[in-house]
Amino acid sequence: MVIYLARRLTWAVAVLLAVTALTFAIFYLLPPGDPALRFVGKQPTPENLALVRHNLGLDHPWYVQYGKFVKSIVVGDKYGWPGLGYSYDSSVPIRDKIVEKAPRTFSLIVGASIIWLSMGVLIGVISAIKRRTIFDRIAMGFALFGISAPVFWLGLMALFIFWYKLDLTAGTGYTSFTTSPQEWASHLILPWIVLALLYAAIYARMVRGNLLDTMGEDFIRTARAKGLSERNVIFRHGLRASLAPIVTMFGLDIALLVGGAVITESVFNLDGLGFMAIDSVFRQDLPGVLGVVLVGTFAVVIMNLLVDIAYAFLDPRVRYA
Amino acid sequence: MRIKRRIATAVLVVAAAGLAIAATTASAGSNSSQHAGAAGANKAAAGGVYRVEYESSFDFTGGFDPTGEYLGSAQGILGNLLVRTLIGYKHVAGAPGNVVVPDLATDLGKITNNGKTYTFKLKDGIKFGPPLNRPITSKDILFAFQRIGTPSVVAQYGFYYDVIKGMTAFKTGKSKVIQGIKTPDLKTIIFDLTVPTGDFRYRLAMPAAGPIPQEVAGCFTQPNEYGRYLISSGPYMFAGSDKLNASSCDTIKASGGISGFDGTTKMDLVRNPSYNASTDSPAARENLPDEFTFTTNSNVDDIYAKIGRGDIEDEVPGGTPPPTVLRQYAGSNQLKSNSGDRTWYFMLNLTQPPFDDIHIRKAINWVVNRDALRKAWGGPFAGNIATHIAPDNLLADKLKGYAPYGTGKGDVAKAKAEVKLSKYDSNHDGICDAKACKNIFSISGDRAVEKTMLPTLEQNLKSIGMTLKDRVLKDAYTPIGTVRLNTPFSTRPGWGKDYADPYAFFGANFDSRAITPTGNANRGLVGLTPALVKKFGVKGTVTGIPSVDKDLDNCQTKLEGARPVCYAALDKKLMTQVVPWVPYLWANYTNVISKNVTQWQFDQFSAVTAWAHVAVK
Amino acid sequence: MSGELLLDVRDLAVQFPTADGIVNAVSGLSFTLSRGETLGIVGESGSGKSVTNLAILGLLNSKRSLITGEILLHGRDLLKATPVELRDVRGKDVAMIFQDPFACLHPMYRVGDQIAEAVRAHLDVSKAKARDRAVEVLDAVGIPNARARSRDYPHQFSGGMRQRAMIAMALVHNPSVLIADEPTTALDVTVQAQILELIDKVKRDFDIGVILITHDLGVVAETAQTVMVMYAGRAVEHGPAAGVFDNPQHPYTWGLLESMPSVQGKVTHLRAIEGLPPSVIHLPPGCPFHPRCPHRFDPCDKIRPPLAAMEGGHSDACHLDPDAKRRLWAEREAVRLGLGA
């Protein structure tokens, strides 16, 4: 197991390097313009332009810059470890920005994932048990709605109904948990539900499908033949066997939200890592882009590893050398 | 069945929890309480918090460092609330808002030496705010200019001050002092210029020319840094300024910035206790709210929803408000629209066929249907149709009504008459038939207005035989500002004034000496010389390009009221003899304010809300 | 073999309404099972043998099946029992083992835990006690190192061991009836013999009744006391094993016997039964076997032959008279063993 972990972690480093190198290349080979031009005013003098480009490290070819980037990650820079540099446009250290924005994204992800997992599994199980009844049809209809409705529309609708008209929640923005837990929850309840809706729908369908398949397996017949209660049969035998793919999906879905919940974060003005990613791209702030890419890739790699370990834990047929 | 009951219970528990959260936080979601004003409901009273949201991000180009910051809205905050200058504005709308008045100086300064020497005396009782709390001296003004002359700080409009004697020598390190600025005593400062510069007062009214304390700003020689440590000379300051330990550069930097400004998403301003209102004038600053907060919001609809509910007072939008918002507030006094002193135009590159022929350039100016183009921007609400280069405000209305190519719908007949005279119309039928008129390469930005304008433009051009090959780019400014790319035409550009003197409109756009290889604003390449051709690698028609350099130099020597007269004449010359632009819209700046605002003004200088004159319930 | 009567199935019929018509999976089935008796139910796929078992255990979906008749277990009609009562019976009074022991065990739980679960399904004991019982039964079915093996997962057991474990699981509550549905079909021939022997031993040691369902006559020949041959949902021959094998009455049984290779002598002619099993939705009129029967004659396609008993409790459903049957069988046997023309 230790060797397996070591091997996976080595791969993780390789993936991180590859992804960041690719990001660098894209930024330099396909950019819409010179990032430095944003910070030299309307009528840039050549001297100012050269100076700013030098400040931003843009006067080296991209592979040299990449080398410096990797070096500063490993050894740190003047802002601490890991050295992610500073934002082009505000000189705020990227590390500080990420540290400030990460809790917002994580708050969003944790809350939403708990909701979507419980709702998805619940609805999926009930739908499977009550296959083809009115409940099943409504549930799958809801699932179709959840998958089809665009997140930004759901978000705006939710804000309009629950904040603007009914004044039940706190609206857009973010308050940290330490400042005020109620405000924190009140700001996040709508984004949680909106984000969870999409995934809950997908998971409900998946759980329903998997459970229906599993319930046709022979060991279910054995369980019934043993005289177990139907609840035991469904949850201990049926659900347990159909969970493995759900767990895999869950881990990866969470990982992808780390830098990916852009729309939800924008609509609800949560200013998390997802919004930082897109904002940095628009403002051609390469260090910002790289920072989020790094964090996001790392999250995916780690979650991948955790999911694989969990899978081995769940299904004893799977063992790693 | 047991399963059903348990599941139902679980659902109810979750729902109950959700409602419980909602109930306890319902109060947190509603309007935060405002300071109760003193007098009656409609009278503007002191007190309260004026809350503003920026669309998406502050977008500061220089990190709010007054020496470098170029963004108009940032200069508005600086000039209204944080930085006083020798000379300032009244922060009101229209022509009166473009008039300079003394701020830190006792008067507008004595001009001697044929307009080359300006002498100012500082008022008594002017001080820096916390943590310094000390009197402002002429040395602090001098330091501001030394900072402008320090290349590493990247003063983004520093070139305006190259007219000060010895500035270039200081910049290049040849001299340790700026010869042209003298401070004989702590209350006197004298500027010597290399040439008579009629708009020098306007340049002194920019935030970069405001006093800067060396003991703090001297620690920051890189761009985008000092902004978070800004020491106020105005009526307000960053919240938490008093907590800054200014004993040494190390302690200053260790703080990471004053807590009231985080650099990217939140700025909190409170009253500056060291500000002495008797040294200022209510005509310029009324300072009614107790506090200003500026925050960012990535959701535009949410900004206007909050204004509608009264959760915030004002916004700094990225563009025009969404059409639904305009409809909602049409006719209401919450909707404010003012001229932004900005001209939107189509750029014509004088070196690229067929635009190297003045008749073609005139023909385009005749044929475009400016009315229809304005419709794409939202109709008459979006602003006035532009008929010449600079907005009338800047020319003191001397060219009001001047429309050499008509107004409104365009005139095909007159356009064809011009085309007939052009070398690209071989059979003189008024339709351009040369190859140069077909598939002209054009660059547009990805703004919705350009997408909507393009069909009208193409239709107009077709009637005189011209077609475009248009390319949409997110960042169109870079290629059209890169000289060697030789872009012939673009629908992207606009130009807003840097300061309230017409030179700010004509200098960068038409002076051949302002042409830079990248980020070039003189996109028509007016005044192109053979030396410049070689230097920048221009290809096309490079001879016979008209120049207005001499006219600019001449107008720059004029003072006061003679300036708009001179520049009005230059505007006319450009529109009739050079024709580098197809101006079509003088855009308005449109704002929606909440019902809580009891007084509101527009700051013509920065083209945003006049923070100095607002009041909230 | 004359033990207490455990199971008395009377006139059992199971119908499934489908979109294409009513499926008569089982019709008019009657049999008994006593202590110490092994009843072998033989038939092809679709003959209704598995459906019969599921009906006994109450594992058919009551919403989609019409069941008539009586299934008396210790005198109590299971078809009239409530789901709770049925659950009480399953695993306790009647236990069942299935064909593919690998698929029948949950892959993610340890074998011992699954057996312990069966224990705690009907007995309120601690987990530790249940696990002890699991080890006990695993040992009883001949698994070496029972305690250590009980902590293994199913995929760590060989095929034969898995089936032993299934048998062990079936025995935890000392059921009266053990139903084994094709227990050896998925196993190697050598292991088959072991399992059959184990089932037989269990029957003797615990004094229970066993229903052995299979399509393989050879399996039945070894261990069953009574044999019932099913075809198209009906019993076509039913009687003591010796009688059925020595003196088979029904042409279908003849066909089954003939299609078996023999170790006794060289079989020159391995004869398959022509034709295909009938659709149980559209049964042919008269005898369900007649389309494939080489001996059919006039009444066969009009009147369904009833299950008629001979002496010795041996019954069959065929219109042929006993003498004709004897003669025809002798002829066929001769052909099969290559004796004479």
Image (cartoon, helix red, strand yellow):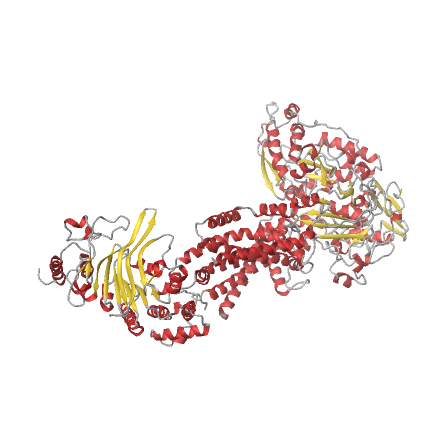
Q: Quadrant of residue A77?
A: bottom right
Where in the figure is residue C235, as x and y percent of width and height? Answer: 24, 58
Where in the figure is residue B165, as x and y percent of width and height? Answer: 83, 47
Q: Residue at x 67, y 54 (%)?
A: B25
Q: Is residue C255 visible?
A: yes
Q: Is residue B585 visible?
A: no
Extreme residue toward the bottom, this view: C145
Image-based side of C259 in relation to A134, left or right: left
Q: Using the image, determine if residue A292 lies above or below residue B98.
A: below
Q: Using the image, determine if residue C7 lies above or below residue B183.
A: below
Image-based side of C93 in relation to A136, left or right: left
Q: Nearer the viewer, residue B341 or B140?
A: B341
Image-based side of B76 in relation to B275, left or right: left
Extreme residue toward the left, this view: C340
Q: Nearer the viewer, residue B77 or C8?
A: C8
Where in the figure is residue A264, as x and y percent of width and height? Answer: 60, 50
**Quarter of the image with the C terminus of chain B in it:** top right
Q: Nearer the viewer, residue B301 or A213?
A: A213
Where in the figure is residue B235, as x and y percent of width and height? Answer: 83, 50
